[in-house]
Image (cartoon, rainbow, N blue to C red):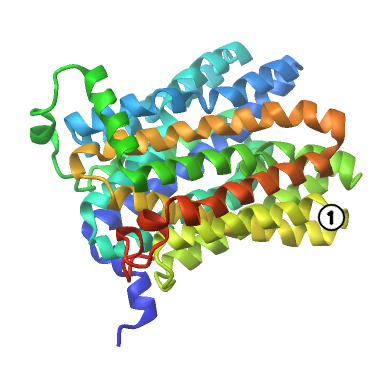
Amino acid sequence: MTNPKSRALAPFAVRSFRFQWPADLAASWAFEIEMLILGWYVLVESESVFLLVLYGALQYVGALVSPYVGVLGDRFGYKSLFVSMRVLFVLLSVVLLGLAIADLLNPIIVILLSIISGTLKPSDVMIRFTLIAQTLDPKQLVGALGISRLTVDSARMAGAVAGVGIFTLFGMVGTYILILTMYVISLTLSFGVAGKDVASIAAKAPASVLQDLKLGIKYVWNNPALRGCFMLAFWINVFGYPLALGLLPYVVNNVFEAKETLLGVLGAAYAFGSLLGSLLVSSNRIALGAGRLMIMAGIGWFAAGLAFAINDVVIIGVVLLVLVGAAQSLCVTPLAAVMLHATEPQYRGRVMGMRILAILGLPLGLLLAGPLIDWFGFAWTWAVYSASGMACAASMIWIWRDSLWSKTSLANVPGRA
């Protein structure tokens, strides 16, 4: 019988994954620290909440171009795109470090440079997952994606804390030396990733990038499993993510009537739950099947959110956010695996680019939540959000029962979750 520990660590037997995982870890930590300290810098130097919100919004701008990034990956190879993006991250950090040393940095420059980095960062996870799908055995995919998610979850938990500490001790210059070092390490390790060259496949594709993109959209729409995954991804961004990625400051101030210290505790609880969920997925021991797991975890995510909406006890809120974070990982990682399994190699970049488009549901959910909370209060608003999300996720059991819920569907082949 296979040792569970050996099964969980099986992806590291692949040389490419041994290079990619630490490369992604270094990049994730750099992303988290950079976003934190630059957001703080913009707020303190400009004393403008508008510029802070603008800086934050620019972190999602890449969702609009992610399908085009996917086309480039399908045409020229994912490793080439992967390395090129890491080169750009290094160059941008060199520019910011140079400006900081010369004391020429200002909030407007930070925001302008954020347009470039914000265009690339949302696609980074897409390329990571696509490379993993190319280089690993399909039976190891869900576990490997769970291990890959650990890089993001660990960065959210510890990267921010480390960044604040270093920024306090050494200032902007010292912190950017650390960020640049991590980007250089990430770039160096990225050269060890083995990406299968798909340029020969792409050479047979239409000459027009726009036509390539249209084929990708048609491909997703005509595949029931992919269409179902995209809808679930959109629903969780509209009805799930706004709580942890936008509304927690309001909850701390207006629901729990506490100080900002509790905001850090709640954020850490969510990140800790997400880390636990990723560890569970990476163990590769869940026998539900990836399709069933993502649907059930989605329902659990919204159920925990519904409980959070009607709760006003701090300790219970902390526990519920741990559950929300865990359900989030148990939903989104199998979702990515199902999409990669259901996609032919020459379409993977475009399909995962379409998946990133679902992120646009997050700002939509936040924009709708603002006036609703003003009119009806947080508890009512979030209860409606969570109930709507539960209904949408549960409907998948019937609407996509053949392609995503059935035990015999490709999405639930034994050993894939």
Estimate the x, y position of residue 48 in percent, counting from the top left.
74, 16
Identify the element where label 1 is drawn.
loop
Q: Residue at x 62, y 55 (%)?
A: 301
Quarter of image, res 42: top right
57 sits to left or right of 30: right
Point out the image quarter for the C terminus: bottom left
Q: Residue furthest front?
A: 398
Seen from the viewer's position, the closer of residues 416 and 39 is: 416
Residue 148 visible within the image: yes
Residue drawn 66% across the image and 44% down it:
388
Q: Relative to 323, does residue 204 appear above or below in the rendering?
A: above
In this rendered view, identify the residue nearer to me: 189 or 2. 2
Q: Where is residue 144 drawn, in percent x and y?
A: 35, 59
- Give the side of residue 38 with respect to residue 96, left or right: right
| Pick the front one: 354 or 402 | 402
Residue 31 spot, x, y in % from top left: 50, 37
Image side of residue 302 versus residue 337, left or right: right
Mark 1 residue type: Asn
Q: Please name the residue shown 82% across and 40% down the image.
A: 378
Q: Quadrant of residue 164?
A: top right
Outermost residue toward the right in this view? 257
Circle 1 residue: 311
Sort mark 1 into few (<14), some (14-19) or many (20+) by Cα contacts within 10 Å: some
